[in-house]
Image (cartoon, grey):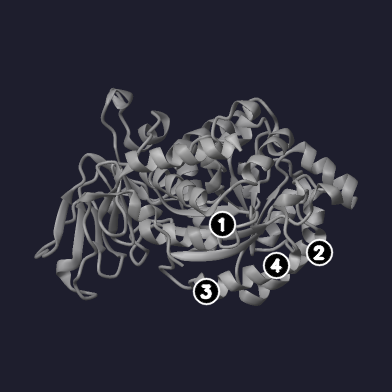
Amino acid sequence: MTNSTTADITADTTGGEHANDHRPGDPRARLWLRDPLAVHLGAGVDPDQAARGIVIDRSTGTIVELVPAGGELRGFLGEVIDASGHVITPGLINTHHHFYQTLTRAWAPVADLPLFGWLQNLYPVWARLTPRALELATTVAMAELLESGCTTAADHHYLFPTGMDEAIDVQVDVVRKLGMRAMLTRGSMSLGEKDGGLPPQETVQDAEVILADSRRLVETYHERGEGAQIQIAFAPCSPFSVTTELMRESATLATELDVRLHTHLAETIDEEDFCRETFGMRTVDYLESVGWLGDRAWLAHGVHFDDEEIARLGAAGASVAHCPTSNMRLASGIARAVELEDAGVNVGLGVDGSASNDASNLIREVRQALYIQRLRYGTEAVTCDRVLDWATKGSAAALGRGDIGTIAVGKRADLAMFRLDGLAFSGSHDPIPALVLCGAEKADRVMVDGQWRVIDGHAIGADGIELDKEALIAAHQEEARRLVAG
């Protein structure tokens, strides 16, 4: 299918660099990010291994060399970029979002409500979603993420009202035009109000329709192996909005097609109470009963697990998307992220929907994670390096990716470059702590698969043209007003 929105919002001036035309292995395709201010290689990894920079082969989209302290490249034929003003991190990876919710940010009727009341007020608004609105919302969310240093994003889309049968197809088109990576989940809701669920009937679908579309999307779009740009996962929304049968059937289909599973779990006490009253069990028991307790699943929030459940999740190899801002915004609680990780659970970060966070900014989420987790575990257990790892290699593991999330030879060249200038950083001494503690808001440059997707803080489309953000904002605001007005 084709869509027009992204084309409509790109300016007619070049703001980026087009993909390199050299053949794989041609030394002229190489790019040296020389002498960075600092490089985040991971907690406990000697940063001197890349003190003089990173060499990328843009013809293959991979990292081919780390230049150590005291090292030098001789006879280098490619391009050199002075990175002395930049902190370089792996591209940040967002493990949980709802792109469509950028249309309902900071809406007064839900500004001061907890999760269930928040949802009940917003469901009727979201039921009016259209393909055009979703395309604009997805573009806004992904562009905002890109400019915050994010290179890969997982979106949990579970709303398919009338006219929205091809919602995921719309998102695929935007991902390709922006040149990011994405894990697009075919979400679902099948348990409406009349059957004891939370969502209104106009937002739910029959299980047969959901499963058929899930299979279609995997067969049409899912890419496998290193360097995959678009992947599909199955994501029944939550225990209070899907049937037990759909949970089981989704797990069976995911095993057959070898894709991942995602859902909200243990986000609030209300959800825990719902599971006890409806299923006679806690959330992790319910997860196991429907065939989800394994390494295929990553779970959004995971705030209210007890000690035994944390141990079971770790033993199963499950993953959790920690969403600190959303959990604070809705007063859901503080996830036990350190204990989860120590038990063997992959912990990643997510910004969650931009109506329960109100921003799609992943570098800001790193700082939030640091502070909320220090409230629970203290300063020494929750370091700046550790939370950066959650946003990078932890998030990559949660999405089942081993080719992104770290800076190492052979990994994909997905990188974020942050400047530490301006008043907010004046007086700071050490680059990695400054990146987190001083509150970085935007990346200066972002690279996906060896190609620039942000230059001078501005998102660049896959065609090398700078996004016309003024036009995008105007169109997006118009749709947001229409959606709320009804």
Q: Which residue is mark 4?
A: 209
Q: Are marks 3 and 2 in contact (CB under 8 Å)?
A: no
Q: Which mark is residue 220?
A: 3
Question: Which element is circle 3 on?
Answer: helix
- Along the line of sight, which residue is nearer the eye, 456 or 380? 456
User: What's the distance in space between the residues labelled 3 and 4, CA to CA?
Assistant: 16 Å
> Residue at 34% of width from left, 42% of height from top?
471
Q: Which residue is mark 2?
A: 245
Viewer-nearest of labels 3 and 2? Answer: 3
Q: Position of residue 323 (x, y in %)?
A: 58, 41
> Residue at 64% of width from left, 27% of height from top?
109
Left or right, 150 with reference to 14: right
Of the image marks 4 and 2, the number of the one nearer the N terminus = 4
Q: Position of residue 40 (x, y in %)?
A: 36, 47
- Along the line of sight, which residue is nearer the eye, 129 or 21? 129
Of the image marks 4 and 1, the number of the one nearer the N terminus = 4
Of the image marks 3 and 1, the number of the one nearer the N terminus = 3
Q: Which residue is mark 1?
A: 398
User: What's the distance in space between the residues labelled 3 and 1, CA to CA?
Assistant: 23 Å
User: What's the distance in space between the residues labelled 4 and 1, CA to CA?
Assistant: 28 Å
At label 1, the amino acid type is Ala
Residue 452, image quadrant = bottom left
Question: Which element is circle 1 on?
Answer: helix
Viewer-nearest of labels 1 and 2? Answer: 2
Of the image marks 3 and 4, the number of the one nearer the N terminus = 4
At label 2, the amino acid type is Glu
Left or right, 62 with reference to 322: left
- Along the line of sight, which residue is nearer the eye, 95 or 199? 199
> Residue at 48% of width from left, 53% of height from top?
153
Left or right, 88 with reference to 352: left
Q: Are marks 4 and 1 in contact (CB under 8 Å)?
A: no
